[in-house]
Image (cartoon, helix red, strand yellow):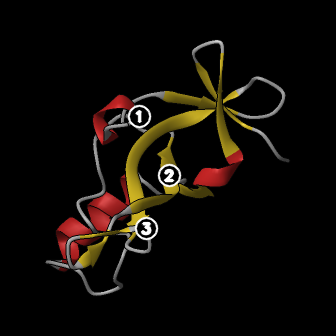
Amino acid sequence: MKASDFIGREVRDHEGASIGVITDLRCVQDGPLRGGAALLRVDAALISTRHTGATLGYDRRPRQGPWMIRAAVRWLHRELRVVPWSTIAEHDGVLQITTH
């Protein structure tokens, strides 16, 4: 699985209504060991109603970057949802949240 296989794809809720597109994936480094480090595992998907691209990290820290850019990016992604990866499944080529 590659991140590019999911970023930009539409996600639907359990009733089939569109809730937005995946703009980014959050990973944690707690997978099996390879060499001296643990592998990354996808933990959550960031879903936005905007197709304007990634949030450029402005969702992670309250004082990230110049305030004007931070304010514009946060306004564009004000409806951003962080959805646990374990609740997203693919059914007939459509990504869908499996729990309400």
To which residue does mark 2 refer?
Answer: 45
Residue 28: which quarter of the image? bottom left
| Residue 73 screen position, x and y as percent | 30, 59
- The residue nearer to you, when weighing 8 against 84, is 84
C-alpha distance separating marks 1 and 2? 9 Å
| Residue 85 screen position, x and y as percent | 58, 52
Element marked by disc 3? loop
Question: What is the three-letter code of the residue carrying label 3?
Answer: Gly
Give the mark nearer the N terminus: 1 vs 3: 1
Residue name at image x 82 percent, y 46 percent: 99
Element marked by disc 2? strand
Crowding around mark 1 (Cα neighbors within 10 Å: few <14, some 14 to 19, many 20+) is some
Crowding around mark 2 (Cα neighbors within 10 Å: few <14, some 14 to 19, many 20+) is many
Give the mark nearer the N terminus: 1 vs 2: 1
- The residue nearer to you, when weighing 44 against 66, is 44
- Which part of the image, by quadrant, shows the N terminus? top left
Q: Which mark is on residue 6?
A: 1
Give the mark nearer the N terminus: 2 vs 3: 3
| Residue 78 screen position, x and y as percent | 49, 58
Residue name at image x 16 percent, y 78 percent: 65
Question: What is the three-letter code of the residue carrying label 2?
Answer: Ala
Residue name at image x 45 percent, y 40 percent: 22
Question: What is the three-letter code of the residue carrying label 1?
Answer: Phe
